[in-house]
Amino acid sequence: KEQMNAALDKIHNHVVNERLLLLLDEYEALEQMLSSHLRQEDRAATAAETHPQGIEEGKAPVEQQHKNGGLNAVIDDDGGDQGKALRSEVKSTNADNMQPDRPAVPKSPSPPLFPSAEEKMKEREEEDAKRKSRAARECLRRLRSNTVVQASMEKAKFARHVVGMFDRKSNDDDDSKGDKGWNLVREKENVCTWYRREEGSKTYTFMVQGPFDPPLINLAVCLYEVDLFHNWFPFLKSSKELKTVSRFHKQIQVTVKAPWPIWDREVLADCFGVNNLHENELLVMLR
């Protein structure tokens, strides 16, 4: 339980500081640990159902074996006709074959008053498995009921998808003709343009990559001032901030001018930053 609480605290810390890629790694590791505990419980429950306590293998749970004068008769507990016939047969057999000098049947040894060391060990293992199961279920409940964590998880998955785009492995030598990898279209003055076809779709994705000379803080300030976008972005007619979700997360609306006879285009965007400084990166997502 302490290990799970520590993982929850780490996840919360990543959410607060927008370390979304680390958040996704920690979340998946925690889910794997919880699933392992729950699988152990499922195996124990299945074993208990297969061999219930107090019932020997090969005997039905609704039947009892009675020993009467050396005759074994299985008597149905429902008291039906079959049970009555068997009881009658047992009585008649005992009356006909009664032997006055028959030696007494030795009694089975009584169970020990105190459990053995193996039984104690088994009980401790079962209790430990139950504690882990309860802690795992409680941890899963806390994770799935936390709307902030779940919203951050969606952003983390989107961030991982975007980061994966930078793996520009061209498949020119492959039979897929580059459908799964990036293909270089143009390279001029350190600015490269790439494209690829999205798997399972007819959609193509384009990416432009190039150097950025101004200090990072200048870029961050410009991106943060949404209401001033139309002053320095070409063809932008208006821009405004709709909502500030968090310190690193904004929802904006911009209107782009279009030449006649095309109508202006309105864009609603969900923008957030991703703190990936442990990899010397700072990501700005817009969707």
Image (tube, helix red, strand yellow):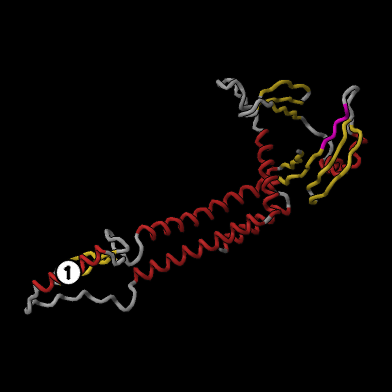
Whether 264 is among the magenta residues is yes
Nearer-the-camera pick, 204 or 107: 107
Q: Is residue 267 visible?
A: yes
For this view, does 248 lie left or right of residue 31? Answer: right
Identify the image quadrant of residue 71: bottom left
Q: Which residue is mark 1?
A: 90
Q: Is residue 234 visible?
A: no
Residue 32's x, y, as percent?
54, 51
Identify the image quadrant of residue 238: top right
| Quadrant containing the C terminus in the rendered view | top right
With respect to residue 19, does 167 lie above or below?
above
Residue at x-position 77% and y-position 44%? 272
Residue 174's x, y, as percent?
56, 22
For this view, does 153 lie left or right of residue 101? Answer: right
Residue at x-position 86% and y-position 44%? 241
Residue 45's x, y, as percent?
43, 59
For this view, does 216 lie left or right of residue 133? Answer: right
Nearer-the-camera pick, 89 or 278: 89
Residue at x-position 36% and y-position 63%? 52
Magenta-tinted stretch: 263-267
